[in-house]
Amino acid sequence: MNSNKMIKRRDFLATATTALAVPYVIPSRVLAAAGKPGANERITLGSIGVGGMGSGHLGRGLKFQELGQAEVVAVCDVDSTRLANAAKKCADAGVEVKVYADYRRLLQRKDIDAVVVSTPDHWHAVQTVHACETGKHVYVEKPSSVTVREGQAMVDAARKYRRKVQVGAQGRSGKPAYYTCRAIRNGIIGRITKVDCWHYETPYDKNPLPDCDPPPQLDWDMWLGPLRWRPYNPRYCPGTFRWLMESGGGQIRDRGAHQFSTILWCLNADRQTSFTVEATGTPPPMGLWDCPPTIDITYTFKNPDWTLIWSQPGRKTGKTEFGQMFYGDKGRLLLEWEGARKWAEPEALNFEPPPGGFEPYTPGLFDDFGLNHMGEWLKAIKTVDHLPNVDIEIAHRTSILCILGNLAYLLGRKLVFDGQLQSVVGDDQANRLLSTPQRHPYHL
């Protein structure tokens, strides 16, 4: 048996308890003290999940190492080929790292200050909570969680262990979203009454394949992690996990996590957590993937009153594959994509805020919005009483929108969500579906 599999939860938590016996856990060389700036020494980083988006984040970590702000010391992946490629990427940059097939081994290292989690969605909550328990700050990819209860656990862990958890909704660190937010918050189109999102359809599996043995480089049991056991199928991964409800949730949980985060920021609606949601969609005609290719979801908010619409394919009002149109009582304003890659509209770019008007913050220095976003996280780690710009609590509220949209589709009825109680009003069945069982030993 792989020795990595033999870490028992009680042993893991014992390690966490030992680590947390040290006040605030993070070394004084990293965390600023009250009244003085944080030290300039590097934050040591470990990367968990180094394929796809994780490879990009690893490159950004190496960039911050080049700038003297971080030091990449470890990489982890359940795919040995991806792991070897990540180690080579570091070596090519002149950086020597230790490699791990089991993230728990990496988290047991007391010399690592923070981790970047770029694993599939169903792993985000467990790995984030475990990282916080062992004293690590966390940058975790969006969406923050698969279920509402997982998201609550992530927020609780970040607060209990005083960790800075940044979620990878990079639009809030992108210059297009910055200019759009500044214009909308300062009244360019008046009071917002509706935001209409369009997005291309979620794919369905047009070429089903039979179950088979996993490829030799992949630890299939570890890849599944908290999910129920099932045989390997080539249609489950790597990136195609997004098209299954239990592991991905379709386009709305993938791209919607980006778009909704930017929308809530532009409307100053992060704390507007109660809403009603209705959804209709078309199930996939064939294959393993079970997310609806087409779907229409309407969210209704009160005090202030406005409506959020997510449609696949929707009413395309821009030139690109997805985006959102803000409708106000004095006009409308377009923002393509999620506010990161495509530039803001000229009206927003040229808008001059009134004296004393709202200023979101100074946009990042890098043209790469991913560098800006990771930089926001590193800044928060070094600064007392400063949360990253997509703190886990903000991201959790965004994920709730995506999760409840899918849930309304699955149940086929209108849901009323109470943001304070984080439950669906008068619907026991829906509330049971706000969490799912997790497989031992990969659970919270």
Image (cartoon, rainbow, N blue to C red):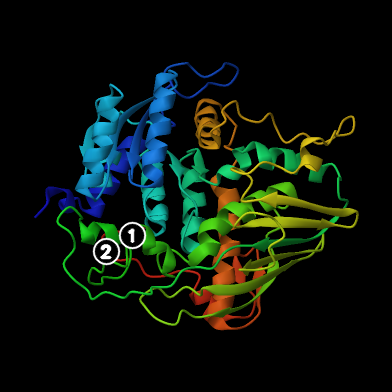
Residue 88 appears in the picture as rendered: yes
Q: How many marks?
A: 2
Query: Residue 227 or 231: which is nearer the viewer?
Result: 231
Placement of 384 over or under 37, stated as above or below: below
Instruction: Name the amino acid, label 2.
Output: His
**Residue shown at 56% from the left, 74% from the top:** 294
Quadrant containing the N terminus in the rendered view = bottom left
Tell me which residue sits at (48%, 24%) in the image: 31
Q: Is residue 283 above or below residue 22?
A: below
**Residue 414: numbered disc:** none
Task: Give the CA distance from mark 1 to mark 2.
Answer: 6 Å
Image quarter of residue 108 = top left
**Side (left or right) of 404 relative to 353:** left
- Label 1 with label 2: CB-CB less than 8 Å: yes
Q: Residues within 10 Å of mark 2 (few under 14, many from 20)?
A: few
Residue identified by numbered label 1: 443
Image position, residue 195 (x, y; %): 74, 60
Q: Where is residue 68 in the image (x, y as percent from the top left)?
A: 43, 18
Going by the numbered disc 1, the residue's amino acid type is His
Task: Judge the density around disc 1: few (<14), some (14-19), many (≥20) Cα neighbours within 10 Å.
Answer: some
Q: Position of residue 301 (x, y in %)?
A: 75, 65
Find residue 211 and report its image quarter.
bottom left
Asked whether residue 25 is in view, the answer is no
| Residue under label 2 | 440
Residue 380 figure quarter: top right
> From this viewpoint, which residue is outermost toward the front?
319
Residue at x 40% of width, y 81% of height: 286
Q: What element carries label 1?
A: loop
Q: Is residue 324 above or below residue 352?
A: below
Q: Is mark 2 on a helix, strand or loop?
A: loop
